[in-house]
Image: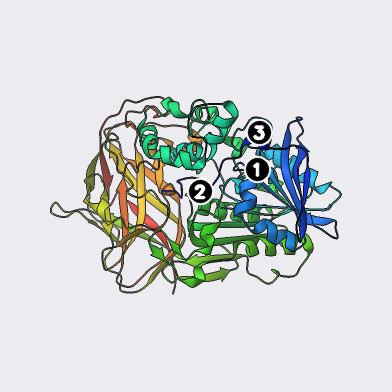
Amino acid sequence: MKSCPSRVLFSSLLVLSSISFSPITSPSNAWVTDKNVAVAMRDGVVLRADVLRPKAGGPFPVLVYRTPYGKEEALKDYTTFRRAVERGYAVVVEDVRGRYASAGEFRPYQNEGHDGYDTIEWAAKQSWSNGQVGTFGLSYPGAVQWLAAVENPPHLRAMVPAMTFSTPENFFYAGGVWDMSWMEWIWNNIAYEARIKKNLPGPKTYKESLAVWKDVGPKMQDTLPLRDVSELKGVAPYYFGWLNHPADDPWWDWCELRNKYARVHAAVLNLSAWYDDNYGPEGAATNFAGLLKARVQEGHPQTSLLLGPWVHGVDETAKTKSGEREFGQHAAIDYDDVILNWMDHYLRGMNNVEHAKPVRYFVMGDNRWREADSWPPVADPTPYYLTGIAAAAHVGGLTTKAPTEAEEFTAFVSDPANPVRNPYASSGAHDYRRLDKRADVLTFDSAVLDSDTEVTGPIKAEIYLSCDCRDLDLWVRLLDVAPDGTVFNLMSPGLDVQRASYRELKRGRQLLSPEQIYEVTLDRLITSNVFQKGHRIRVQISATFFPNFSRNLHNGELESVSAKMQKANIRIYHDVAHPSHIVLPVVPR
């Protein structure tokens, strides 16, 4: 699933009563630190930040980092702050509203636009600041940058939002399906500090939360309706607020980025990875493309895209293995250098990235980096069609030849009470060979490849289906089958699912008519992978993938408000009139 499966790597207990709200200056060999500096927001709420700055000289360009996980922990766990000060930056590390030392009510993401704007502009006006401000951070600290940037703070010059989103449609939901990892994110990373502030029972540290999750987590995930997860009611009222807004609710526009790129004038480096949480690689590619379009009249669009082979997290960018898949020594990057080189260029005017190509991505299988002037690379969009599964077999075909049969389908039964379960709790590449034994998972394999086949870029699946139900979720997973039988996934769950009733999201929810054939399109899949000679390309279809994402009840009722489940008989068509297929961007070699 996701690293935690969450949007953060760590957090720990901060004893609130020990915080001093008077700024304390702590000298070191190279810099001074002003602790718990007051930063007033436009509504009068005071946030608290630690400010690191070089001992001598100034004024300095400023880097702002905003976090819900505790500024004290960030300063201990990350080296970027120290290295930034050593390069001549002042650094503002701030607890977001309602977390740790900062006042106010914590409502994830919803206050970060205005609060981020106010913090950036506050930093620009300080005596130690030269008015040139940049932002950086990964996951939640990446998201806050975008939410502030679309408010267009005048002094924001550069930003590096890493492993974050572009749209609530692929963040809170994915293809209309609720992302279940929010439960674990809240429980492990947010709830214990809220219990301390509210004097509520339950775990009070990160370690305690992890230990208790082993027992309480499965119970929470199995709970229906979703709004009945009692374990979060005291510590996370916002979670239930989210559930009140289905995927097609215009309420979510407050965190929609795709219609706001023209408001952003900072230089943006978009960074993610193929095994990042589902929103990451799509978010980076979408945000990059959106900025290019918004800045088409500008001589230099001042945006770049970096996509590696890692899972979610800062530390992961220094590793060469994602899950069970090894990519070699060149897969790792120096995350701090990437950020600070970008800032050096756009905040300090250093000519250090002028001649670099704007796109850099890692080609899995080849295990090498490629630089390009644009994304996606030139490729041949190649349809691979599903073919039938014979009665005595359990695997169908995947071929570039369009079907000729007049009527053909493969059927399976989906039972939300017995969903397809992800056997892995961690992110990254894993061996999914066992899933093809399930009767509710349809598997389609290509012939053994007689040459290396590179697939790089966005991927689209077009599947024709019918059901005796009112709604279903369609999972179309792309995998790489090695000669020894290993079956690796190529992305994290969530890019490869679409709820049928939300097949045209802008038109709202449209329930299915039983037995009618529908075309359902999935267009968020993305990767860069070489299927090597001797391998096979695999597509797997199911109606559940739990507990990563919620279960469709099949009766037309939403799982947020109902617990009533029913089995569904689903047909996947692959005939001349209904040629179900996946379109792979095959790069000429």
Closer to us: 538 or 232: 232
Q: What element carries label 2?
A: helix
Q: Which of the two discs, 1 and 2, labels the residue nearer the N terminus?
A: 1
Q: How many marks?
A: 3
Give the mark toward the camera: 3 or 2.
3
Mark 2 neighbour class, 10 Å CA radius: few under 14, some 14 to 19, many 20 or more: many
Work out which quarter of the rendered image holds the C terminus and state it: bottom left
- Classify residue 561 as left or right of residue 514: right
Residue 562 picture quarter: top left
Q: Where is residue 92 in the image (x, y as percent from the top left)?
A: 73, 49
Q: Position of residue 525 (x, y in %)?
A: 44, 53
Kindly identify the amino acid type of the residue bearing the numbered disc 2.
Answer: Tyr
Closer to us: 69 or 264: 69
Kindly identify the amino acid type of the residue bearing the numbered disc 3.
Answer: Ser
| Outermost left residue | 392
Give the mark toward the camera: 3 or 1.
3
Q: Is mark 3 on a helix, strand or loop?
A: helix
Residue 575 in view in this figure: no
- Classify residue 516 as left or right of residue 307: left
Label placed on residue 17: 3
Mark 3 neighbour class, 10 Å CA radius: few under 14, some 14 to 19, many 20 or more: few
Q: Position of residue 148 (x, y in %)?
A: 69, 43
Residue at the spot of label 1 = 147
Residue at the spot of label 2 = 279
Gap between marks 1 and 2, in whole Å? 15 Å
Residue 521 in view in this figure: yes
